[in-house]
Amino acid sequence: MGDHSGFSRAQTLMIYLVLTGSIASGIAIFSSASTITDLLKTATSGLFLPLLLSLIATFLLDPAVQFLEGERVSRTTSIFIIYFLILAVIALLLVLIGPPNWKGMLNALKADFPRYIARAIEYLNGLLIGLQGHFPFIENYDLPGKLSNTAQQFFGLLLKETPKSALRIGSLFLLVPLFSFFFLRDSKRIMRGLISLTPNRYFEMVLDLYDHVSWQLAHFIRGRILEASIIGIVVYLGLSLTDIRYAPILGIIAGVTNLLPYIGPIIGMIPGLIIALVDLGIGGQFWWIVCVYLLIAQILLDNFILIPILISRVSNLHPLWVILAIVMGGKLYGVIGMIIGVPIASVIKIALLEIRHYRQNLYRNQSLFLSRND
Amino acid sequence: MNPFWSNIFRGTGYEDSVAYFLSTIPIFEDLKPKELKLLEGMVHTRTYRPDEVIFHEGDIGSGMYCIRSGQVSIFNNDSAGRAVEQAQLGPGDFFGEVALTVQKPRIATARAVEPTVLLGLFRADLHEAINKYPAVTSKILLGLSRCISDRLQYAALKLHQFGSNSYPPADRE
């Protein structure tokens, strides 16, 4: 038996032992790895939002810090100056305008929310009954039921999470400035450390690529954030011309959802339109609000002014990728994941394009150069 | 002398520091100690094994290297594929400085002969420093252009000599 395969008994035993040992250790490593990732997930679960916000703050503040930094002003000093200026502006606003009544607004919204949903469902029902006259098969779909279900779930979540999120917002005020301080001060050093780990053969290429990609990315992310804030402010201003309530919250929603191409602006419009419909009814003000959302914010401002100035066409994603990014982001990190999924996909696209461009350049140069000997 | 005692009385080791080493490189000789400190933050320290290639002929260059320790051989491959050595460089020498200004292919291959430590200054870092430390960067660029124009003048002289040797004056008319 042993003679056929050319192994002695001891050798067969040895192979058997080694195989069993390696399989067992593989399983052990695998299972412990999954517990480790679980542990990591639990440990970092609350950190995702503060880290994200401080990264955003870092990208926004970095040009200002670089503007002040110089041969006589160290980076740390210039960060402190910027922080001080921001604090001064906030304090000035508080003194001039007074603290915003967020709590009252949230409580009022909590009371109004079921009312808005109920009216929206009522309206939808009316619409459906009208439609059923033309398309009888619609009866099979319980759209209003589904909508009220989701709305109730969302409302319950809102009620449950508000005390928790108040605590979390308090910790955000502490964590975000702290994190972004260290990001601003040490990000260069951290990246240098990471780049210096690359093998000698690829070091120059990696350094060059990092330089190109990081510039593009910073430009893109800054542009996106600026675009969202400007849209939010314009929507807020446009809405506050009417009698609609919650204009600041609606402005924030419109700004944040504007980060999603194609679908985002529509989602951002829905709450504003529902509130307008319920409170103001269909009339001049309602059409003005539609106008603000669609014509002024989206078509005029975003398409004709902001996107051409702030965001290069390079980062445009195919609609299919947008949908995939939203779905995958939502699976990973819920609502926040849905919003940042698309920017992350664009970031990946920019990085890939840069790398391809660099490689093309490299080969063209090399072929030009090597043909010199012929 | 007892090595135990000699170690105590040696200074703080400024002569061993990267900043002092950089001040001995001709390109950086105009920089003051404080500016050398800033430059120290811009360079990357790379370690090479014997026979490891630093860059190949035809690679896209992105910066210059100064030899901190070790030996570097600069060579070209001739049409038969044999290596023709152009220079052997030692500690304190620098090479690849043309790539600091423009993204062009390297004109020769550089290879470490023995265990070598190089300090690399790259275009990406220099570009970033232009806005941040304009005085330091302009001194570096001035030193760089001085080195390159020295070399250009030397090359022009050589070319002139070469030309006057191969064409005797009588043939020129």
Image (spheres, coloured by chain):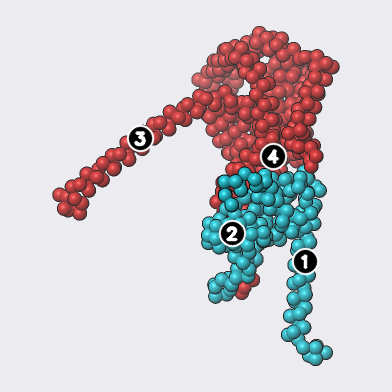
Chain colours: A red, B cyan
Q: Earlier in the sequence, mark 2 or mark 1?
A: 2
- Tell me the distance, in whole angstroms, between the alpha carbons under discs 2 and 4: 39 Å
Q: Residues within 10 Å of mark 2 (few under 14, many from 20)?
A: many
Q: Which residue is mark 1?
A: B150
Residue A342 location, x and y as percent? 61, 35
Residue A218: mark? 4
Distance in Å between CA atoms under marks 1 and 4: 40 Å
The reply to whether label 1 and label 3 mark residues of one chain is no
- Residue beneath disc 3: A27
Mark 3–mark 4 Cα distance, whole angstroms, equals 42 Å
Alpha carbon of mark 2 to alpha carbon of mark 3: how far? 47 Å
Same subunit: marks 2 and 1: yes
Pointer 3 chain: A
Q: Is residue B100 above or below residue A49?
A: below
Q: Amino acid at mark 2?
A: Gly
Res. A333 image quadrant:
top right
Q: Are marks 2 and 4 in contact (CB under 8 Å)?
A: no
Label 4 SS: helix
Which residue, given by chain and number where applicable, does mark 2 sit on?
A: B70
User: Mark 1: few, some, or many residues within 10 Å (few <14, many ≥20)?
Assistant: few
